[in-house]
């Protein structure tokens, strides 16, 4: 992460770097477009980055990364990209979800977390069988709904439907429920609830 700057300024640094690696010399309007902000906000952020020694900016001209800025922008960008790679290619999230999550998480990654994630991604890419197995496991886990997301029939409202993944409770209760033809895999719709 870039030293001594806010998350917002790191986003500006990353946007400038993206334009830089695309072979463009960024202008304020280009940076504003990438971040979906007004030019005035970009000008203010660029001034702050300039005070920290990350960029040089001529009034109404181009924004150029300094050596310090380039080094720190690369760090911010690499953290962002590795998170997107992990979210999309391992966890199976959409690119939109990955962009949103990465933009928030990248600012809080310490070096230990980044190096560990980078090592994990390198391992998975070098071992495609393990990557495939990990993706299958995650996909199946999502389908079975982790316990954090489970709800009980009592939590459903009238007219709501739910798929049964598990029948819990003591053995007598489970047997009574299954004797009524209710079993995992069945989808039920709540028509009426008993009075409590």
Image (spheres, helix red, strand yellow):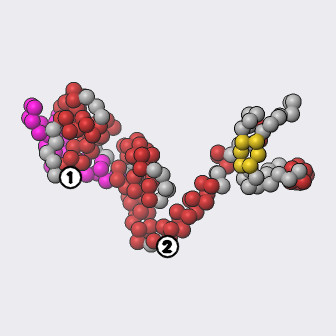
Residue 100, picture quadrant: top left
Give the x, y percent position of residue 162. Answer: 71, 45
Which residue corresponds to the image point at 64% horizontal and 45% vertical from the top-left?
149
Per the image, label 1 sits on a secondary structure element best described as helix
The residue labelled by disc 1 is 21
Which residue corresponds to the image point at 41% horizontal and 68% vertical from the top-left?
125
Mark 1 and mark 2 in contact? Answer it, CB < 8 Å.
no
The residue labelled by disc 2 is 129
Which residue corresponds to the image point at 30% horizontal and 40% vertical from the top-left?
11
Look at the image and tell me whether residue 48 can be seen. no
Give the x, y percent position of residue 46. Answer: 19, 34
**Position of 163 compared to 117: left or right?**
right
Which residue corresponds to the image point at 39% horizontal and 52% vertical from the top-left?
84
- Estimate the spatial distance between the alpha carbons at disc 1 and disc 2, rounded to whole Å: 33 Å
Residue 4, picture quadrant: top left
Q: Callout 1: 10 Å neighbours few (<14), some, many (20+)?
A: few
Q: Reading the chain from its start, which is encountered first: label 1 or label 2?
A: 1
**Position of 158 compared to 196: left or right?**
left
**Position of 182 compared to 122: left or right?**
right
Tag count in the figure? 2
| Residue range of the region highlighted in magenta in the rendering | 50-79
* Rendered position, 194 above or below 141: above
User: Viewer-proximal residue, 152 or 180?
Assistant: 180
* Rendered position, 178 above or below 194: below
Look at the image and tell me whether residue 23 can be seen. yes
* Rendered position, 61 above or below 165: above
């Amino acid at each position: 992460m870039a030293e001594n700057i806010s998350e917002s300024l790191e986003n500006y640094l990353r946007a400038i770097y993206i334009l830089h690696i695309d072979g463009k010399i960024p202008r304020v309007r280009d940076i504003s477009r990438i971040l979906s902000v007004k030019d005035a906000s970009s000008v203010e952020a660029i001034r702050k980055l300039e005070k920290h020694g990350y960029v040089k900016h001529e009034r109404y001209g181009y924004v150029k990364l300094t050596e310090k800025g380039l080094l720190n922008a690369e760090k911010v960008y690499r953290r962002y990209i590795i998170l997107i790679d992990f979210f999309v290619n391992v966890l199976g999230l959409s690119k939109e979800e990955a962009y949103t999550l990465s933009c928030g998480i990248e600012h809080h990654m310490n070096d230990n977390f980044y190096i560990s994630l980078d090592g994990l991604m390198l391992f998975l890419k070098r071992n495609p069988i393990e990557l495939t197995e990990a993706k299958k496991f995650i996909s199946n886990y999502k389908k079975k709904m982790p316990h954090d997301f489970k709800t009980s029939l009592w939590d459903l409202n009238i007219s709501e439907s739910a798929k049964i993944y598990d029948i819990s409770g003591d053995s007598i209760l489970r047997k009574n429920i299954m004797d009524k033809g209710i079993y995992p895999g069945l989808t039920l719709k709540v028509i009426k609830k008993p009075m409590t």
